[in-house]
């Protein structure tokens, strides 16, 4: 993905890197209704992020078997925490491709630094590391991503499609996916029942 590659080479943060995008009630695209997206890269060329509060039917052990990292006998022996690792729906683009957002205690050469303590890795090595208990302290896995062309995200924000706020590792990585949308809004003092369709930035 060119946007990630250029960010990796530039090594500089973008406008909305390490921010949450929170879908407003008037979101026109049903795929993003009540979604929270973590922005991994944002520049004049466009933006890329992962939806963090939509899940896939597939579980992590299924993915390991599908990719040939482990066989069905081996995944049975995985620790419960790894077996229960939820695979999220990161967005409508490139849905067969996997991305892992994780704490900065694990890095490989291909890892993209999003913030001082959050990285993105899209290679199979991190899945092997997680399955072997050598992975990052905190992680979330997604298939697919959400992408915007040059100026597109800025336009959607200006048209009140999204609210933005700084991300925190606690809200990013905690396991309560079902209530994440409401909890992130609450963390910036917003009560959805009082939120009009005309809102700005938090």
Image: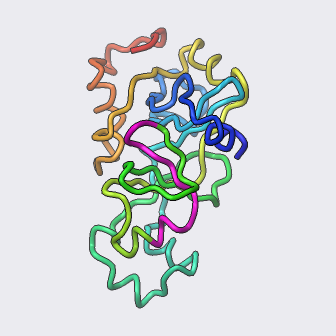
Q: Residue at x 40, y 57 (%)?
A: 106
* Segment tinted magenta in the rendering: 115-128
Horizontal and vertical percent position of residue 59: 44, 67
Q: Is residue 179 left or right of residue 148?
A: left
Q: Quadrant of the C terminus?
A: top left
Q: Is residue 116 left or right of residue 58?
A: left
Nearer-the-camera pick, 56 or 11: 11
Horizontal and vertical percent position of residue 135: 38, 64
Q: Is residue 30 above or below residue 83?
A: above
Q: Residue at x 36, y 69 (%)?
A: 134
Query: In the rendered picture of this protein, how many numbered marks are placed on residues?
Result: 0
Q: Is residue 175 left or right of residue 94?
A: left
Nearer-the-camera pick, 153 or 124: 124
Q: Is residue 42 above or below residue 70?
A: above
Residue 110, quarter of picture: bottom right
Residue 124 lies within the magenta run:
yes
Horizontal and vertical percent position of residue 14: 56, 27
Q: Residue furthest bottom?
A: 73
Residue 41, quarter of picture: top right
Q: Residue at x 50, y 43 (%)?
A: 113
Nearer-the-camera pick, 159 or 80: 80
Nearer-the-camera pick, 151 or 8: 8
Residue 166 lies within the magenta run:
no
Q: Is residue 86 above or below residue 161?
A: below
Instruction: Give the colour scheme of this rendering.
Output: rainbow
Q: Residue at x 48, y 28 (%)?
A: 23
Residue 22, quarter of picture: top left
Horizontal and vertical percent position of residue 11: 58, 36
């Amino acid at each position: 993905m060119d946007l990630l590659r250029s960010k990796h080479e530039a090594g500089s943060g973008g406008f909305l890197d390490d921010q949450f995008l929170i879908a407003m009630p008037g979101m026109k695209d049903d795929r993003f209704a009540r979604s929270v997206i973590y922005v991994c890269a944002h520049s004049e060329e466009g933006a890329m992020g992962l939806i963090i509060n939509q899940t896939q039917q597939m579980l992590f052990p299924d993915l390991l078997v599908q990719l040939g990292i482990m066989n069905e006998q081996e995944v049975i022996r995985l620790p419960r925490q790894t077996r229960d690792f939820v695979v999220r729906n990161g967005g409508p683009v490139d849905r067969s491709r996997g991305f892992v957002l994780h704490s900065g205690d694990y890095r490989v050469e291909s890892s993209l630094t999003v913030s001082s303590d959050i990285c993105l890795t899209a290679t199979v090595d991190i899945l092997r590391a997680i399955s072997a208990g050598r992975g990052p302290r905190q992680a979330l896995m997604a298939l697919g991503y959400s992408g915007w062309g040059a100026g597109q995200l800025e336009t959607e924000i200006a048209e009140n499609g999204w609210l933005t706020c700084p991300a925190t590792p606690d809200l990013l990585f905690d396991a309560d996916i079902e209530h994440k949308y409401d909890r992130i809004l609450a963390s910036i003092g917003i009560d959805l029942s009082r939120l009009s369709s005309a809102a700005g930035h938090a």
